[in-house]
């Protein structure tokens, strides 16, 4: 059995030849570079995400605020008890004014325009002023009288405080109660009630004629006849007569002076 041994020079040459064809791989260096790339990518990604979220939030708030200007998500309804600021509602209010005390009401109604002619077209109306202590027994008859003549009349009702008229919403008396105070027969409070009715009617510039009525009054003629007669007349009509009875005699006594 023979064995051969290689000389050191031959071993070095062989090793050199193997290293030339299969160089050692730098695994440690490649792993460090890969880790740095991953960390850099994560840092850039996080920075981009933060920047994108910030810009998106700003644009969302901007466009949301702009959209709400034209397409509001919350719709606010107008309160009919509050007066509008438009010139139309000031000249010809479609609902009664909010509650005012007598001084405020009379001051507002006493305003006189400086212009002799109105700078807009208007249709004269007749204001029917009802003074009652309770229900209106002839409300249906009056509704038939007013029917079909909207825009030519106004209705105002003075009742006892806290009383609510029980009428349908299609009635001419619906929503036409003015803020009222207690009234006593034969006292000056009757005049105050008449002044409240007249003052509320004067807030509508289209009212030119005013008719004071009670719950016992009824229309004798149709509306066109009454309207034409009143609007074409330049006179005021006061119904006063001497009642030849014990009621009339008592009413004319000095203690009852304010009632006549």
Image (spheres, rainbow, N blue to C red):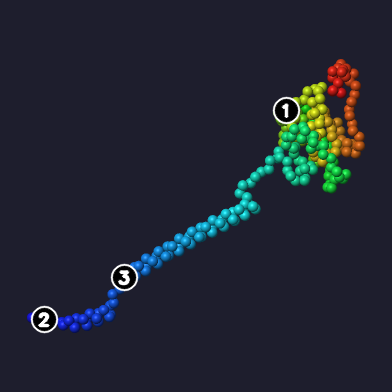
Q: Which image quadrant for residue 107?
A: top right
| Distance Cα–Cα, label 2 vs label 1 | 136 Å
The x, y position of residue 161, in whole percent, is: 72, 28
Taking the spot 78% from the left edge, 23% from the top edge, the residue there is 184
| Label 2 Cα crowd, 10 Å radius (few <14 / some 14-19 / many 20+) | few
Secondary structure beneath dot 2 equals loop
In this image, 85 relative to 213: left or right? left
Taking the spot 42% from the left edge, 65% from the top edge, the residue there is 40
In this image, 134 relative to 235: left or right? left
Secondary structure beneath dot 3 equals helix
Q: Which mark is nearer the camera, 1 or 3?
A: 3
| Label 3 Cα crowd, 10 Å radius (few <14 / some 14-19 / many 20+) | few
* Quadrant containing the C terminus in the rendered view: top right
- Seen from the viewer's position, the closer of residues 228 and 154 is 154
Q: Check the image and report above or below for 18 versus 121.
A: below
Say which label, 2 or 1, has the lower sequence index: 2
Residue found farthest to the left:
1
Instruction: Identify the residue under disc 1.
Output: 161
Secondary structure beneath dot 1 equals loop
Q: Check the image and report above or below for 15 versus 219.
A: below
Q: Check the image and report above or below for 29 versus 246.
A: below
Instruction: Identify the residue under disc 2.
Output: 3
Say which label, 1 or 3, has the lower sequence index: 3
Q: Check the image and report above or below for 108 versus 2.
A: above
């Amino acid at each position: 059995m023979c064995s051969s041994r290689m000389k050191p020079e031959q071993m070095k040459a062989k090793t050199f030849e193997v290293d030339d064809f299969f160089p050692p791989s730098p695994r440690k260096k490649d792993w460090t570079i890969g880790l740095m790339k991953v960390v850099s990518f994560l840092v850039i990604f996080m920075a981009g995400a933060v920047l994108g979220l910030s810009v998106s939030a700003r644009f969302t708030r901007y466009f949301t605020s702009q959209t709400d200007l034209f397409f509001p998500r919350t719709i606010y309804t107008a309160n009919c008890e509050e007066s509008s600021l438009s010139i139309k509602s000031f000249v010809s209010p479609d609902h009664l004014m909010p509650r005012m005390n007598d001084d405020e009401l009379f001051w507002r109604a006493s305003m006189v325009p400086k212009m002799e002619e109105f700078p807009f077209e208007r249709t004269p109306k007749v204001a029917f002023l009802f003074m009652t202590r309770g229900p209106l027994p002839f409300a249906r008859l009056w509704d038939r009288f007013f029917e079909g003549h909207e825009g030519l009349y106004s209705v105002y009702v003075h009742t006892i405080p806290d009383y609510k008229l029980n009428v349908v919403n299609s009635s001419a008396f619906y929503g036409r109660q003015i803020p009222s105070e207690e009234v006593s027969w034969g006292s000056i409070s009757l005049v105050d009630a008449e002044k409240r009715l007249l003052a509320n009617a004067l807030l509508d510039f289209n009212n030119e004629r005013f008719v004071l009525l009670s719950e016992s009054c009824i229309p004798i003629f149709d509306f066109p006849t009454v309207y034409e007669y009143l609007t074409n007349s330049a006179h005021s009509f006061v119904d006063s007569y001497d009642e030849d009875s014990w009621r009339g005699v008592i009413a004319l006594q000095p203690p009852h002076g304010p009632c006549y």
